[in-house]
């Protein structure tokens, strides 16, 4: 696969077919924020969402954790809603936690973090919206 390609259809398909936990990093408790809209959508479609926001105890009726590493048990996908310059520590946590994939949302572009995740064996999607990709395939 071309190293610069971060939207490979089979990778997107694998991630969308997950049955495990999806940690949503940067999930806002504010319903008008993109992270909240996407997480609500995923919940409505049967995904197991785990909020990651150190400033909140609960979001969308679910316990919020301060970091990916604080989430009990396995996490399959880490969906990141953070500024690009804040992505690398979260990706390192995802690698250490043994997750299978990281998804960097629209506008979240960090080539070094994406390469590190891929080199560690994780599936990587970058600069795409998981909600939009799910909707495309649901038609």
Image: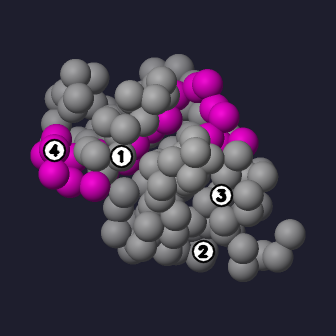
Where residue 85 sits in the image (x, y, percent)? 39, 74
Q: Which residues are magenta?
A: 14-34
Classify mark 1: residues with Cα within 10 Å, few (<14), some (14-19) or many (20+): some
Residue depth check, mark 2 versus mark 3: number of the one nearer the observer: 3
14 or 3, which is in the foreground? 14
Q: Which residue is mark 2?
A: 112
Q: Secondary structure at mark 2?
A: helix
Residue depth check, mark 1 versus mark 3: number of the one nearer the observer: 1
Left or right of 106? Residue 29 is: left
Q: Which residue is mark 3?
A: 124
Q: Which residue is mark 1?
A: 38
Spatial CA distance of label 1 from label 4 is: 10 Å
Do the CB atoms of the residues marked 3 and 4 lie less than 8 Å apart? no
Left or right of 112? Residue 79 is: left
- The answer to whether residue 6 is seen in the rendering is yes
Residue at 65 percent across and 57 percent down: it is 124
Spatial CA distance of label 3 from label 4 is: 27 Å
Q: Secondary structure at mark 1?
A: helix
Q: Which residue is mark 4?
A: 31
- Which disc is residue 105 wearing? none
């Amino acid at each position: 696969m071309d190293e610069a390609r971060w939207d490979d259809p089979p990778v997107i398909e694998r991630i969308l077919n997950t049955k495990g936990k999806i940690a949503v990093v940067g999930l806002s408790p504010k319903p008008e924020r993109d992270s909240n809209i996407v997480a609500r959508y995923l919940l409505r479609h049967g995904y197991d969402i785990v909020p990651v926001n150190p400033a909140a105890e609960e979001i969308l009726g679910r316990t919020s954790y301060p970091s990916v590493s604080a989430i009990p048990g396995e996490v399959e996908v880490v969906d990141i809603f953070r500024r690009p310059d804040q992505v690398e520590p979260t990706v390192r946590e995802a690698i250490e936690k043994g997750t299978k994939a990281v998804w960097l949302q629209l506008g979240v572009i960090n080539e070094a973090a994406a390469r590190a995740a891929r080199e560690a064996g994780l599936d990587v999607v970058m600069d795409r919206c998981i909600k939009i990709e799910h909707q495309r395939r649901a038609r």
